[in-house]
Image: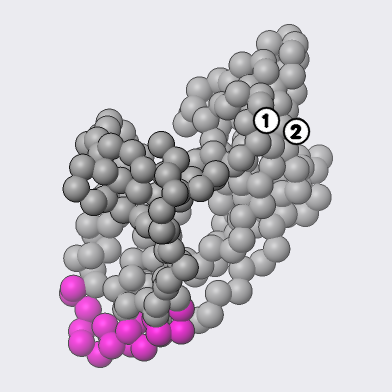
């Protein structure tokens, strides 16, 4: 329920507080569902391996990550943030690399400098019931343009829902990158009238650039 109170976030007793789209919200605490999908298992496995890898570094290597991390701030929560720790930066970089199938690193990379995002729009077609999702790509998306998407939403949804990584952007043909198979492998085939949200951003050395968000309705056949 929406409440009038000081800004707050997190669990306190039997309640959880967080900032909603329309103000401060408080709800009863419930144990989150744990379907333990292959995607969850992959992320958890990466976190475990990254933690083991950091502990195996030499003191000098860990100190180098601590020094590099001081240049970057943690994500703001209730208007507050602070310098990252060496492990936070190490995990941030290496979990992304692991998820994208790249080799992890023991030396901090340089400052983030991701290139521009090639995809510029989302086009959905429905030809005799065969639905195709394509990203318009005037340029080459490169090797590591990450594509995320939401599960099918109601046509009236406008706020960007939670998105999940589908994979890397396929090479375009005639100015379009077909992401149909990536999408259906994760969420199944959408239906006519569904709203689809897709995000794209580039990744270099474990650093992710800003995400571009596209949305479109699945048309009727």
Distance Cα–Cα, label 1 vs label 2: 6 Å
Q: Residue at x 41, y 53 (%)?
A: 5
Q: Is residue 112 visible?
A: yes
Q: Does 190 sit above or below residue 48?
A: above
Stretch of the chain drawn in magenta: 55-72
Mark 1 in CB contact with mark 2 (< 8 angstroms): yes
**Label 1 crowd bin: few (<14), some (14–19), many (20+), radius 10 Å:** many
Point out the image quarter for the N terminus.
Answer: top left
The percent coordinates of residue 54 (x first, y second) are 24, 72
Q: Residue at x 55, y 44 (%)?
A: 22
Q: Which residue is mark 2?
A: 123
Q: Main secondary structure of the magenta part?
A: helix
**Foreground pick, 164 / 204:** 164
Q: Residue at x 61, y 55 (%)?
A: 211
**Foreground pick, 3 / 146:** 3
Instruction: Name the N-terminal-most of marks 1 and 2.
Output: 2
Q: Which residue is mark 1?
A: 133
Left or right, 209 with reference to 57: right
The percent coordinates of residue 217 (x first, y second) are 71, 26
The percent coordinates of residue 185 (x first, y second) are 48, 29
């Amino acid at each position: 329920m929406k409440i009038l109170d000081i800004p707050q976030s997190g669990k306190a007793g039997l309640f959880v507080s967080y900032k909603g789209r329309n103000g401060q919200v408080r709800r009863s605490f419930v144990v989150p569902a744990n379907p333990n999908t292959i995607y969850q298992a992959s992320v958890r496995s990466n976190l475990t391996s990254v933690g083991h890898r950091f502990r195996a570094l030499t003191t000098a290597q860990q100190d180098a990550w601590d020094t590099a991390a001081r240049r970057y701030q943690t994500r703001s929560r209730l208007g507050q943030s602070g310098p990252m720790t060496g492990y936070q930066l190490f995990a941030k970089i290496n979990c992304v690399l692991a998820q994208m199938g790249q080799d992890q690193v023991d030396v901090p990379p340089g400052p983030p400098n991701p290139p521009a995002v090639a995809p510029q729009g989302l086009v959905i077609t429905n030809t005799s019931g065969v639905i195709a999702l394509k990203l318009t790509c005037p340029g080459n998306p490169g090797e590591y343009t990450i594509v995320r998407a939401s599960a099918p939403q109601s046509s009236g949804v406008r706020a960007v829902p939670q998105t999940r990584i589908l994979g890397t952007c396929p090479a375009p043909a005639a100015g379009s990158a077909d992401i149909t198979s990536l999408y259906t492998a994760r969420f199944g085939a959408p239906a006519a009238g569904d709203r689809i949200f897709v995000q794209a951003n580039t990744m270099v050395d474990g650093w992710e650039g800003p995400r571009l968000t596209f949305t479109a309705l699945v048309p009727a056949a």
